[in-house]
Image (tube, grey):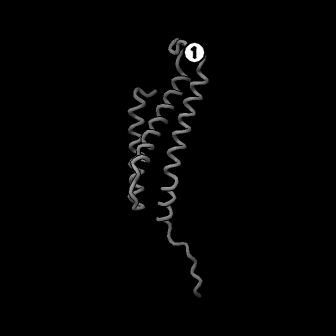
Amino acid sequence: MINQPTIYGIYVGLGFGVLYLLMHLYIKQPPDFKKFATIVLSCVGAVVGIAFGYVALTAPDSNLGVLTDQRLPMVLGAGAVIWLAVEQALNIYHPIFARCVQKYRPNNAINTDN
């Protein structure tokens, strides 16, 4: 799998953070640093959750030691981390994306002059 999932998660998070900043530049509103940090940390959580879930599913029993019988809770925990990270990022992106689409969309007024 991934040797350093945290590092890759930071890269992915910074990429989505830059997208967040660009979207705010497009709609001409100042970005919120707390939301930027939430996006970065959500991406780190999602990538680490994926890596942890993969390890929990594929690791031999000898590597898990006393946690051998805890595979299902570990995978469910990784799934919960991924779910919450994606949900948090979508909650931040949805209003901004809607404003970007609204700004891009031409005026939909119907001309009634005949």
Name the foreground residue: 46 vs 37: 37
Q: 10 Å neighbourhood of mark 1: few (<14), some, or many (≥20)?
A: some
Q: Amino acid at mark 1?
A: Thr
Name the residue at 42% across, 51% down: 20
Residue named by callout 1: 68
The C terminus is located in which quarter? bottom right
Q: With respect to residue 45, does 101 lie above or below?
A: below
Q: Residue furthest bottom?
A: 114
Q: Position of residue 39 (x, y in %)?
A: 45, 44
Which quadrant would residue 24 be assigned to in this image?
bottom left
Q: What residue is drawn where x is 40% and y is 28%?
A: 4
Query: Looking at the picture, how far across and down is residue 70, in whole percent?
Result: 59, 19
The picture places residue 40, in percent across and down from the top left corner, at: 42, 41
Q: Is 60 located above or below residue 111 in the figure?
A: above
Q: Secondary structure at mark 1?
A: helix
Q: Is residue 19 left or right of residue 97?
A: left
Percent from the top left, x then y, of residue 53? 53, 27
Q: Is residue 50 left or right of residue 24?
A: right
Q: How many numbered markers are drawn?
A: 1
Q: Is residue 97 above or below residue 48?
A: below
- Seen at 56% across and 38% down, the residue is 83
Query: Relative to 113, does residue 99 appear above or below in the rendering?
Result: above
Residue at coordinates 57% horizontally, 27% vertically from top-left?
75
